Every structure is written in structure tokens, then in C-alpha cells.
Amino acid sequence: DTGVSQNPRHKITKRGQNVTFRCDPISEHNRLYWYRQTLGQGPEFLTYFQNEAQLEKSRLLSDRFSAERPKGSFSTLEIQRTEQGDSAMYLCASSGRGRTDTQYFGPGTRLTVL
Amino acid sequence: AQTVTQSQPEMSVQEAETVTLSCTYDTSESDYYLFWYKQPPSRQMILVIRQEAYKQQNATENRFSVNFQKAAKSFSLKISDSQLGDAAMYFCAYRSALPASNTGNQFYFGTGTSLTVIP
């Protein structure tokens, strides 16, 4: 068990550019979550996958945001036409099967939009 | 939607002393889970302790224990014998216990309490 990993750890981009983040969950976990965390705030839910199916999306997830989990393993989160307000830490978490499983978080990707 | 409130933005404790972090939540559900997560500076979030709402007994994990008051919708974290490594941001979180196919999978987090441990 190597834990949840995320790449890159830091991303600096110019406004208007597209960025993509990757999350590799714990290998036996079938559920994957994306959160956004801004300074001084707790994480806010963005979206949730069970295997390859995207089952929940927050209203926070505008049309510029898209997430995929094509084979039910790793996931990508893409932000198109980035805006300065997108600057935040993007956290990925995974959990195993069953109702009582806890989410385990990755180290996050810190996005800075200039 | 469920809300989680942490009314203490910052707390401090002397090393080896005990500190209690407060958390309240609002929900109409009867079956749910509550969590405390620790996020050290520039490091990832780590689970500290978990409580199932249907259990009356308060959860404990070594030096960490909770005071779960379901009727009052309160879920405080007590850290005993505080250590320098306990310094971090602590987040209280709520998760519904609805079946996985419903909307109960996301966590709702509070705004966090920054804990400083004084040597």
C-alpha cells in the first residue's frame, strides 16, 4: 500500500491555459474523490467516481472542469481556460468497498494561476 | 446540505497538556459518520479518529479521544499529553451513511482549527 499519489505537486500557469492533474488511488480502492481547498478553508467536494463511473458532481464543478477515470484506476482532473479564482489546492482521496470505509487523501496539487 | 462548524480558528496548548477542539454539525439524518483529520503544514491530510453515529461509545485512538453528543450534534476532539508533532490544522468532517449509490459519499468539512503546541 503506497497511499494516494498526485501529480504534479505544484503547478503554476497563466490565466487562460489548460491544466491537467492526475491522481493514483490506493490500488484496491474503487472509489475516488476530488476536492478543492482554498487557504483557510476546509476541502470542498468536487466530484466522485465509483470505479469508472462519475456518480456525483458538485455545483462547484463548472463547465471548465472535467474529470475522468477511464479504467477505474487513476483519475485526471482538467481545468480549461484557467482563471485566477481557480488557484487552490486540489485534493484527491480514495476509499474501499463498503459503507464504512474512510477516505484516504493524497498530498494534493497546488495550482497557482497568474 | 449538511454543515460542519468549527468555531475555534486557532488553539494553543502547552506540551504534555490536554486540549479539546470543538466541532458541531447540522443534519437531519440519523445514520452518519464523523471524522477528525489532521493536516500538518504542507503535508497531506491524515485520519485521526472516526466515530459511527449509531455507536454510543466514544471512539479513542491512543492519545486522541472524542466526546460525541448526538442529541447536541457535537463532536469534540481531545488530545492528551500533547506533543510537538500534534501541531497542525485539524478538520472535523461529516459523511452520510446512506448507501453508496446515493449522494452520501462526499465529506463535508469544517473550516479547521489551527493547533499550536508550545514547548
Image: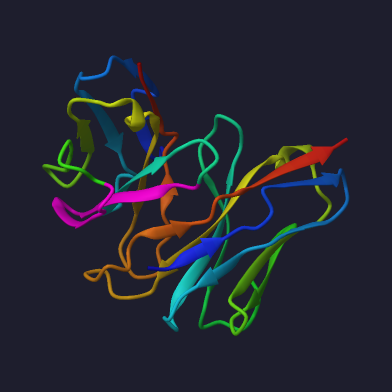
Residue A73 placement, left or right of B97: left
Which of the image's four quarters has the N terminus of chain B? bottom left
Relative to B51, is B55 above or below? below
Residue A58, position in %: x, y? Answer: 26, 54
Q: What secondary structure characterizes most of the magenta part?
A: strand
Residue B69, position in %: x, y? Answer: 64, 79
Q: Which residues are magenta?
A: A42-60
Q: Residue at x 40, y 24 (%)?
A: A9
Residue B57 placement, left or right of A110: right
A26, A89: nearer the viewer: A89
Q: Residue at x 44, y 75 (%)?
A: B32
Relative to A89, is A111 above or below? above
Which of the image's four quarters has the C terminus of chain B? top right
Query: Which corner quadrant of the image does residue B36 belong to?
Result: bottom right
Residue A71, position in %: x, y? Answer: 12, 43
B53, A25: nearer the viewer: B53
Residue A101 placement, left or right of B14: left
Tell whether position A30 is magenta: no
Tell whether position A47 is magenta: yes
Report the coloring of the rendering.
rainbow
B82, B74: nearer the viewer: B74
